[in-house]
Image: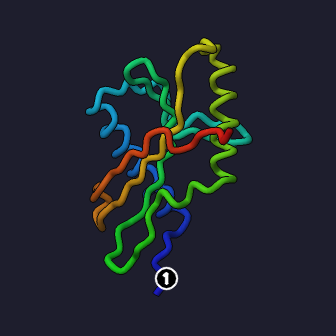
Amino acid sequence: MDESPSGSDAKGIGVAGEEAVASFIAQRGHTIICRNYRKKFGEIDIVSTSDGVMHFIEVKTSKFFHDSGFLPEVRVDSRKARKLRNICRFYLSENKVQDNTPWQIDVASVMLDDSMAPKGIELFENAVFDRI
């Protein structure tokens, strides 16, 4: 039996994950600036600030299956990381964010149970960065 979600199921899973992360970070003192910032070349799920740092958060969500060792965060590969860096830089420029404002790209991993409730959330801070 194929356990992969259909198109509408995948969208519902993604929305549930983003809602869970928004609540999770707000409880930890983040102020959410915007959600689902989209351009034709990319998207940022959540933009927030905390302690003077701007956070661009990529949310990856999966349904929990007991026999699956697959974690949502592994879907942020080098291609996705490059797209995230580009869209974040565009956001900063378009919104005239001061050059000296510290910012980072975080990845939030969400596992949902069968009722679409969060079973676990993990936030990987500064998970995507430029290699020197």
Residue lying at 46% horizontally and 60% vertically, measured from the top left: 72
Taking depth in this image into account, of 21 and 81 the one nearest to the observer is 81
Task: Give percent across and percent down for residue 105.
Answer: 53, 37
Task: Give percent across and percent down for residue 120.
Answer: 29, 56
Taking depth in this image into account, of 111 and 19 the one nearest to the observer is 111
Q: Identify the element where label 1 is drawn.
A: loop
Residue lying at 53% horizontally and 69% vertically, measured from the top left: 6
Residue lying at 37% horizontally and 38% vertically, measured from the top left: 22
> What residue occupies the far front of the structure in this picture?
132
Q: Is residue 28 above or below residue 92?
A: below
Residue lying at 53% horizontally and 21% vertically, measured from the top left: 102
> What residue occupies the far bottom of the structure in this picture?
1
Q: Amino acid at mark 1?
A: Asp
Total numbered labels? 1
In which image quadrant can residue 50 be found?
top left
Q: Is residue 105 above or below residue 95?
A: below
> What residue occupies the far right of the structure in this picture?
40
Q: Is residue 27 left or right of residue 55?
A: left
In which image quadrant can residue 92 be found?
top right
Q: Is residue 89 left or right of residue 9?
A: right
Q: Can you identify the residue that label 1 sits on?
A: 2
Please name the colour scheme applied to the rendered image.
Answer: rainbow
Q: Quadrant of the C terminus?
A: top right
Task: Give percent across and percent down for residue 43.
Answer: 62, 41
Task: Give percent across and percent down for residue 10.
Answer: 50, 61
Q: Residues within 10 Å of mark 1 (few under 14, many from 20)?
A: few
